[in-house]
Image (tube, helix red, strand yellow):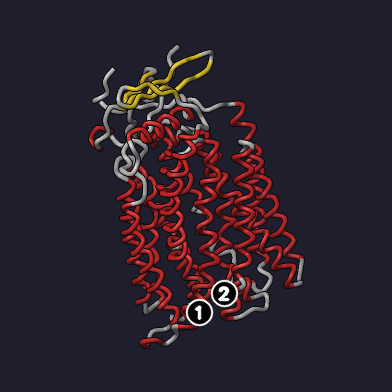
């Protein structure tokens, strides 16, 4: 019986990256699939959960998340510090109205949408260790230059450029993670990645409070301008360091031994049975994503939870309306993100432990929807603060599970998976555009429209997750090779042309 196969060889040809004598085979043994791999002619059989695999995964985790977590934390700091700067005096200095601030927020997202799919298609053909830190260096420079903004028009313009440059990072990391980790490992890793954004909310509040207060007027520069200078400079510094640490693909990462490369490729192949080694053209990959109903299911689901997540940009404003002002409002965002982080990690660990996605999306989304709905009718500030903690926690807990579920279903070819992940993230972020208008200043202090709409988004996400559970079970993912002009590969996958039989 012939089985389509998958190679983790994402670049055009592993040989050009210097790998030697590695072969992977997919065979049938004792009525089950068996992945055999060769290192320098020595035959090995892949056994899930072996000590060698656990050591390898630990090594991958250490390198991967040292880089992507720090970079994503900085990504969110550079994206969201405009909220801290607004509270810290930027709104007054630039004469920003509530509408002006909303425009400065939302202009980021159309630019962000433009670059995601092209960026992932480029990433599938180049070295991530150069590409991802490279775009990080550029956005760090742009974030630093935000300190020089003199007018509201200048703020809008530089936010647009920042959005375009940042567009390739998030979806690129999602693709990279799904190329290294097995399905049952992915939710935790998505949560680790997302945790950086949560920490940026807490860390951002602490840093903003300290910088804006401590450096106010130093060298004749306002505190909120120092915030952009410091956070942008940190981003550029770490982007250079991580060129030497971030992994590339399983078959060409320099800090892996030849045996580790083979094992890394074998374990992904064992998990993605039915994928292909043959490359898929960019246009075919894009069209195949558009033709797959699963794309729209995950896009809608993610759009709802991302729409709910726009509340994050207004957390400093919401806390200031609960009776805290100035730096106290900045610091009171920290417990909110602490609760969010704990909930997110618990849900992700449970999702991987039980190998279940739909209910791990629906349950936290329902929790968030309920918390936001209750906040509308409650006037007690302490209760509103608690509801905000668990509302944000539920929202952020659902986010990484949706992102893990998408490549768990749309597994191959690599190019289709790359485009699907970029498309889902791209279209879903449209909700961030209109989400920015849900919190007008004249709706303070209760923000009924924002809370009610955010609650509805959460419940819609939960419903779509339950529908998705039914549809993906009834109609399992398959790929029509003939329709897209491709051939199913033989059982053997040769990672390197120098392989000996």
SS for tag 1? helix
Q: Is residue 306 left or right of residue 275?
A: right
Residue at 47% of width from left, 61% of height from top? 76
- Is 9 displayed left or right of 411 in the figure? left
Q: Are the residues at dot 1 and dot 2 in contact (C-beta closer than 8 Å)?
A: yes
Residue 161 visible in the displayed image = no
Q: Can the viewer see residue 227 in this picture? A: yes
Quadrant into which the C terminus falls: top left
Query: Which residue was labeled with disc 2?
Result: 330
Residue under label 1, please give it.
88
Q: Using the image, determine if residue 29 lies above or below residue 227.
A: above
Q: Where's residue 54, x and y in %?
A: 49, 38
**Relative height, residue 354 to residue 141 (above, below):** above
Percent x, y of residue 443: 64, 71
**Residue in the picture at 32% in, 34% down:** 258
Q: Position of residue 447 (x, y in %)?
A: 66, 68
Q: Nearer the viewer, residue 298 or 266?
A: 266
């Amino acid at each position: 019986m012939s089985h389509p196969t998958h190679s983790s060889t994402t670049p055009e040809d592993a040989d050009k990256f210097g790998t030697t004598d590695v072969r992977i085979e997919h065979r049938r043994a004792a009525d089950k699939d068996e992945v055999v791999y060769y290192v320098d002619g020595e035959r090995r059989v892949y056994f899930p959960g072996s000590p060698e695999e656990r050591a390898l995964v630990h090594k991958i985790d250490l390198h991967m998340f040292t880089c992507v977590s720090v970079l994503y934390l900085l990504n969110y700091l550079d994206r969201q510090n405009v909220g801290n700067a607004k509270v810290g005096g930027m709104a007054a200095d630039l004469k920003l109205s509530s509408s002006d601030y909303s425009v400065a927020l939302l202009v980021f997202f159309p630019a962000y949408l433009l670059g995601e799919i092209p960026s992932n298609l480029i990433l599938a053909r180049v070295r991530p260790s150069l590409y991802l830190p490279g775009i990080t260096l550029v956005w760090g420079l742009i974030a630093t230059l935000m300190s020089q903004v003199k007018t509201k028009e200048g703020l809008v313009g530089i936010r647009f450029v920042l959005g375009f440059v940042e567009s390739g990072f998030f979806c690129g990391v999602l693709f990279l993670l799904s190329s290294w980790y097995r399905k049952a490992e992915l939710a935790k890793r998505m949560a680790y990645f997302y945790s950086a954004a949560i920490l940026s909310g807490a860390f951002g509040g602490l840093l903003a409070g300290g910088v804006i207060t401590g450096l106010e007027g130093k060298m004749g520069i306002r505190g909120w301008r120092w915030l952009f200078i410091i956070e942008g400079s940190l981003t550029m510094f770490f982007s250079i360091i991580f060129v030497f640490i971030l992994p590339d693909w399983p078959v060409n990462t320099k800090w892996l031994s030849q045996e580790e490369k083979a094992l890394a490729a074998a374990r992904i192949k064992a998990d993605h049975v039915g994928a292909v080694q043959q490359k898929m053209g960019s246009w075919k990959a894009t069209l195949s994503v558009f033709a797959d109903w699963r794309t729209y299911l995950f896009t809608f689901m993610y759009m709802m939870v991302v729409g709910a997540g726009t509340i994050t940009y207004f957390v400093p404003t919401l806390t200031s309306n609960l009776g805290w002002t100035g730096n106290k409002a900045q610091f009171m965002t920290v417990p909110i993100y602490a609760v969010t982080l704990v909930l997110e990690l618990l849900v992700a660990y449970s999702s991987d432990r039980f190998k279940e996605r739909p209910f791990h999306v629906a349950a936290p989304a329902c929790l968030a929807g309920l918390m936001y709905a209750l906040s509308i009718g409650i006037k007690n500030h302490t209760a509103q603060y608690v509801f905000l903690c668990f509302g944000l926690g539920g929202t952020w807990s659902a986010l990484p599970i949706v992102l893990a579920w998408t490549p768990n279903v749309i597994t191959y070819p690599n190019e289709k998976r790359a485009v699907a992940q970029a498309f889902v993230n791209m279209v879903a972020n449209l909700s961030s555009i209109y989400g920015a208008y849900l919190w007008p200043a004249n709706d303070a202090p209760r923000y009924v429209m924002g809370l009610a709409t955010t609650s509805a988004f959460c419940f819609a996400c939960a419903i779509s997750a339950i529908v998705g559970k039914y549809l993906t079970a009834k109609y399992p993912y398959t790929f029509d090779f003939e329709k897209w002009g491709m051939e199913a590969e033989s059982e053997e996958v040769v990672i390197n042309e120098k392989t000996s039989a």
